[in-house]
Amino acid sequence: MNQKLSGKPGAVHYGGVPYREIGADAAEIAHPEKGGKWFEDGAQEDIVVHRFGRFVDPWLEDQTIIDEIRGEGGESDFRLRYAARTDSPPQMAALRQRVENIFFFNEEWLGAVTQLIRYAERKGRPVKIDIVAYSPEDILRAIAASAFGFPGYVPTFRLGIEHDGVVERFIGVPEWDGSPPDFNKVISEHFAGDSFGYFLACHFGVNRSMNSDIMIDLGMRYAVFREGESGPERFRVQGASIISVKGAILSMNQMIYEHQEEVGQLVEIFMTTDQGFAETIESFVNSDHNIAERQLAKMLESEAPPAEEMFWCGDITDCDLCGQPFALMRFMIDAILLGGVGANVCALCFLKEGTGIGAGRGQIYETDEKGWRHIAG
């Protein structure tokens, strides 16, 4: 693997640019979680795979090797991206094995996803199931990061069931029951009153087995919802049918908003003890996209809210201009750009290329528990 450098000692020149070659004797990259970080999109300028032994195989593509190192095929025990068809027994067996692997510490999502797989199989005709999941079993880190609006540590999954041209979508997220959190009690009961005990538990991986107990103490659980026209909705599986269930939904972000002082104490622990966490958050907060979102939020203070509640219909994943994932964004803008072309863009691209806020120029949407809610324009 060749990693792009800026003239660091020990670099070699590949294509006229300084690079460092990382060998198996110099760095541990076989572990899926480490591989996922090293090979994430944008982390490497160029990747050259040198093959030896069994890897000298014309049918084995370089991309397949990289995908397995990333762990997205089920090798990782906290990240998964996989698709299967119900008319393929090998694919379905592989899907079940991967689901059991990633949700080993998460009985709620394991049971819910298994039930949805059975629901898909009861359709009686070929159905495609696709799942993207992230389940690190570390709710304390997720809460601390979410206080900054950073979603990178939040456990979630999205599952789609496609049949007869229709796609049913389901989402898994942490849900709060409304009870006030007590992080001092959590540290006291689970880590002998020493916050460093938490980081030691993370180092050895034992925090994952106690995560469900911590969530119970915080009034949280792993919930699964169906994505309806007006946002997430509760449901239950009944044979080959999905039955809607009424009930209010309280998100983890709502807990953070209502108990800012208590959450602030947890944030301080992470920011002063975990250097990697602090660097990640600082980079996120000071990114161009987040600065643009704060600038747009300031502009919206003088905008009158819409008279009626309205949500964006349809799937949108990335900014049409820069490709930034909307999953990381607070705002999405349905904008008419300077060239007269309409597009769904992020705040940064809107401030650069947009023609203003208002009907026929730019309608601003903000993400909430129900989806993208129209808030201005």
Image (tube, grey):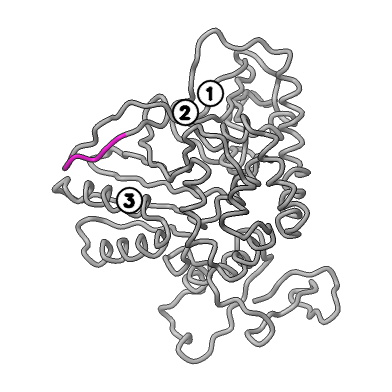
Pointer 2: what residue?
370
Amino acid type at image mark 1 = Arg
Residue at left offset 25%, top offset 67%: 90
Say which mark, if any, is on residue 130.
Answer: none
Pointer 1: what residue?
373
Residues under numbered marks 2 and 3 in contact, where contact means CB atoms less than 8 Å apart: no
Q: Residues within 10 Å of mark 2 (few under 14, many from 20)?
A: some
Residue at left offset 67%, top offset 65%: 44
Amino acid type at image mark 3 = Val
Pointer 3: what residue?
113
Q: What secondary structure do most residues of the magenta stretch adopt?
A: strand
Amino acid type at image mark 2 = Lys
Would residue 91 be seen by someone viewing this image from the given angle? yes
Give percent across and percent down for residue 110: 35, 55
Residue at left offset 68%, top offset 75%: 2
Q: Kindly report the distance in space between the C-alpha atoms of the residues bearing marks 2 and 1.
A: 8 Å
Looking at the picture, does residue 324 appear above or below residue 292? below
Query: What segment carries the magenta color?
Result: 235-240
Give percent across and percent down for residue 10: 82, 82
Furthest toward the top, the residue is 307
State yes or no: residue 356 in magenta: no
Give percent across and percent down for residue 222: 43, 45
Residue at left offset 67%, top offset 38%: 262
Residues under numbered marks 1 and 3 in contact, where contact means CB atoms less than 8 Å apart: no
Residues under numbered marks 2 and 1 in contact, where contact means CB atoms less than 8 Å apart: yes
SS at badge 3: helix
